[in-house]
């Protein structure tokens, strides 16, 4: 944002650079920081209220009459309007020039002096107010009121995301209003000279003053609202943690209910399987019996057919014998007796065939009845077995559905636990006074490095060492990367280049040693990542920021690589 300057305005003159600066003290707690911010914006609002009450809330000024009064004074002093560029020169002239009593007591002259007094108060107060407001928003709000969204990793935590979006909205709104203030101040600076035009167009700069005051008050209210929302941010995180825990308990109850349902279904499936096995055995047994009865029925049927053939043969023999006996051909007594005996034996055989046939027919009827009963029962057993098998398949599918649902719920519980870990971490970062001090310390170190680099550039001729190849820049880049890489430091260490080359076993040993030391000393993932990158710099003789960025890109940390490239590189790594 360009520095706002007013020509010939002492309060906005550039402050000379001092070699000895007062040491800045870090904020002790969040509450102290909030209190300091609120005190500042309340003081700003009080100054604006006093200015508005004194200079903006009075009756309307007749700027035309004021212009006429100025013209009359210039004629009495025998001076030209071009002799006064600003109100300062006019007031200086009033110290040495006499004004007639009737002119001095006129309303237009009083309004003219009021315009000068108002311009003086505005130009003395507003620059300091603006600087306080900018410092308050940029050095306090934007630096200490953080959402810590970078701690989310790949998780989707809605309160953190929403608060970060709210912070972006507050920042854009405040920056827009500050830009509006700057624009109005610059416009006012263009209108303040020459003095006669300033008086004639008094309604314009009066409106600009009012717009600046309104914008300052709006920024102050936005700052208060931002502070209020930042103060409630840990409570919202805690509410989200409680909600997640409640939701997790409900999910665990669902798992218990599903596990009980799974056990019941397994017992039912076991009973169904036993029923199916029993029905299947019965079906096979009846099937064998049916086959046996069919074979017996076929045998009896064949026997009946055979007896029927024998019956027809015997009947034909009997008919032949009867016809022979009725024949008139003379025969001997012996032949007649033999024919009679043969006829008797044949008739006896026919009676036996009749009896056998009757027995076989009864046996056939019995076998048919038994076969029908066995066939019906076999079919019933088959239908029952198929039905039970289908029910068994449905129960297996139901068990599979329960297992899938349980796995899904467990995944949700794992996700909730991961979110709760991140929420607790962000809440601790937000509540801990050490967090503000850490941010403050990093900011002071960064400012100190920039100042030392600037002074060294002023004293020494520039040396071309390649983009991003200085040790200080590489150390800064490594610390910046460590803030965001977190638990992925092991994977990053495995993908960074080494010169001379470092084999896989030595890298694994390095990772193991770093991990053991960090566990014993209870280091955070960020501190462990810093140690890891320091070891890489020690073992890599030609390490630079370009290699660090390439390692990040290999790890698919594209956004982080672009941030490092934008912050610490002059040219693109791949150019």
Image (spheres, rainbow, N blue to C red):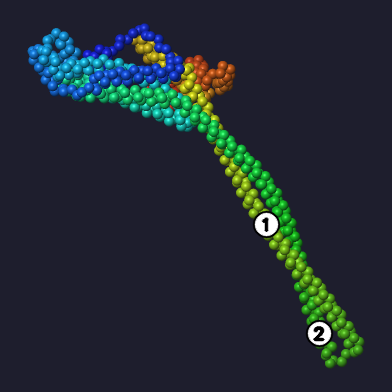
- Asked where in the image residue 513 lies, by quadrant, the reply is top right
Residue 243 placed where, x, y %?
51, 32
Counting residues from the start of the chain, the first of labels 1 and 2 encountered is 2
Look at the picture and state if 252 lies above or below 94.
below
Look at the picture and state if 58 lies above or below 260.
above
Residue 395 placed where, x, y %?
62, 47
Q: Nearer the viewer, residue 248 or 526?
A: 248
Left or right: 71, with 524 as reference point: left
Q: Nearer the viewer, residue 542 or 102?
A: 102
Dot 1 corresponds to which residue? 382
Which quarter of the image is occupied by the C terminus?
Answer: top left
Residue 363 placed where, x, y %?
78, 69
Residue sitting at the far top: 20
Q: Residues within 10 Å of mark 2 (few under 14, many from 20)?
A: few
Q: Residues within 10 Å of mark 1 (few under 14, many from 20)?
A: some
Which quarter of the image is occupied by the N terminus?
Answer: top left
Dot 2 corresponds to which residue? 320
Look at the picture and state if 373 lies above or below 482.
below
Left or right: 319, with 432 as reference point: right
The residue lying at 38 percent from left, 23 percent from top is 224
């Amino acid at each position: 944002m360009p520095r706002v300057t007013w020509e010939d305005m002492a309060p906005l003159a550039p402050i000379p650079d001092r070699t000895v600066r007062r040491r800045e003290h870090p904020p002790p707690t969040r509450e102290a920081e909030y209190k300091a911010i609120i005190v500042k914006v309340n003081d700003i609002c009080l100054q604006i209220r006093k200015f508005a009450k004194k200079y903006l809330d009075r009756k309307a000024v007749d700027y035309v009459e004021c212009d006429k009064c100025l013209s009359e004074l210039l004629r009495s002093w025998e001076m030209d309007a071009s002799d006064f560029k600003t109100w300062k020169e006019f007031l200086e002239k009033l110290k040495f020039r006499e004004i007639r009593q009737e002119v001095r007591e006129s309303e237009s002259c009083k309004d003219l002096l009021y315009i000068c007094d108002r311009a003086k108060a505005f130009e003395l107060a507003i620059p300091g107010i603006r600087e306080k407001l900018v410092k308050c928003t940029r050095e306090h709000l934007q630096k200490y009121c953080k959402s810590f969204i970078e701690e989310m990793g790949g998780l989707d935590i809605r309160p953190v995301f929403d608060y970060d979006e709210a912070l972006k909205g507050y920042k854009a709104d405040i920056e827009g209003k500050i830009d509006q203030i700057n624009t109005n101040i610059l416009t006012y600076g263009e209108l303040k000279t020459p003095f006669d035009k300033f008086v004639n167009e008094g309604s314009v700069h009066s409106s600009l003053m009012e717009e600046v005051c309104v914008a300052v008050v709006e920024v102050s209210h936005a700052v208060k609202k931002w502070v209020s929302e930042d103060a409630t941010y840990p409570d919202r995180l805690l509410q989200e943690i409680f909600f997640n825990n409640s939701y997790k308990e409900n999910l665990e109850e669902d798992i218990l209910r599903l596990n009980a349902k799974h056990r019941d279904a397994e017992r039912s499936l076991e009973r169904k399987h036993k029923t199916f096995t029993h029905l299947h055995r019965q079906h096979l047994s009846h099937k064998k019996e049916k086959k046996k009865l069919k074979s017996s029925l076929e045998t009896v049927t064949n026997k009946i057919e055979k007896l029927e053939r024998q019956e027809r043969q015997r009947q034909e023999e009997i008919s032949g014998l009867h016809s022979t006996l009725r024949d008139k051909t003379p025969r001997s007594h012996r032949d007649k007796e033999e024919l009679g005996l043969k006829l008797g034996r044949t008739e006896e055989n026919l009676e036996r065939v009749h009896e056998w046939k009757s027995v076989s027919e009864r046996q056939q009827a019995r076998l048919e009845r038994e076969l029908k009963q066995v066939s019906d029962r076999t079919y019933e057993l088959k239908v029952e077995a198929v039905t039970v098998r289908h029910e068994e398949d449905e129960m297996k599918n139901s068990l599979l559905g329960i297992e899938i649902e349980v796995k899904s719920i467990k995944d949700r519980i794992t996700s909730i636990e991961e979110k709760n870990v991140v929420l607790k971490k962000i809440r601790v970062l937000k509540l801990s006074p050490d967090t503000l001090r850490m941010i403050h310390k990093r900011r002071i170190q960064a400012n100190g490095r920039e100042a030392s680099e600037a002074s060294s550039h002023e004293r020494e001729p520039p040396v071309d060492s390649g983009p991003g190849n200085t040790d200080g820049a590489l150390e800064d880049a490594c610390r910046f990367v460590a803030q965001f890489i977190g638990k992925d430091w092991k994977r990053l260490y495995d993908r960074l280049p080494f010169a001379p080359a470092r084999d896989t076993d030595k890298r694994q040993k390095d990772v193991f040693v770093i991990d053991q030391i960090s566990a014993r000393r209870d280091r955070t993932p960020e501190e462990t990542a810093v140690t890891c990158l320091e070891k890489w710099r020690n073992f890599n003789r030609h390490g630079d920021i370009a290699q660090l960025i390439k390692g990040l890109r290999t790890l698919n940390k594209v956004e982080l690589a672009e941030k490092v490239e934008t912050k610490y590189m002059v040219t693109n790594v791949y150019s």
